[in-house]
Image: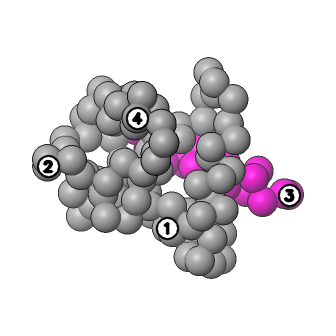
Amino acid sequence: MRFRERVMAVVEQVPAGRVMGYGHVGAALGSPRLARQVGWALASLPAGTTVPWHRIIRSSGHVALQGDPARGTLQRALLEQEGVVFEGDRVPMPAYGWSPA
């Protein structure tokens, strides 16, 4: 299975109302140092995808979509629709963070 497919397999496991950090996805794939590559894989998704890309955020709890403020606004809205409550501009990771079993 290619890296991108492995990333999507992890992301698709994240339940509604929960989030993972890019590095946490990398760790689930065997290396937390793959955070940037996880971001690139998610950025390559086509519009209208069913992969819940919006559930992957920075480990600090911040939405991380530099250069695309509209997508960041969409990501926050999608998370809030799922019941994720932001504290200011970040998601409290202890309350909403998820990791695969």
Q: Residue at x 75, y 53 (%)?
A: 4
Q: Amino acid at mark 2?
A: Glu
Query: The N terminus appears in which quarter of the rendering?
Result: bottom right
Q: Amino acid at mark 3?
A: Met
Q: Nearer the viewer, residue 80 or 41?
A: 41
Residue 100 in sight in this render:
no
The image quarter in which residue 69 lies? top left
Residue labelled with disc 3? 1
Q: How far is the residue under mark 3 from the one under mark 4? A: 32 Å
Return the mark for residue 24: 1
- Chain part drawn in magenta: 1-16
Residue 58 is covered by the magenta coloring: no
Q: Residues within 10 Å of mark 3 (few under 14, many from 20)?
A: few
Q: Name the front one of labels 4 and 1.
A: 4
Q: Position of residue 62 (x, y in %)?
A: 32, 54
Q: Position of residue 32 (x, y in %)?
A: 56, 76
Question: Is 32 above or below relative to 82?
Answer: below
Residue labelled with disc 4? 69
Question: On the picture, is 36 further left or further right than 91?
Answer: right
Question: Is 16 above or below relative to 6?
Answer: above
Residue 79 in sight in this render:
yes
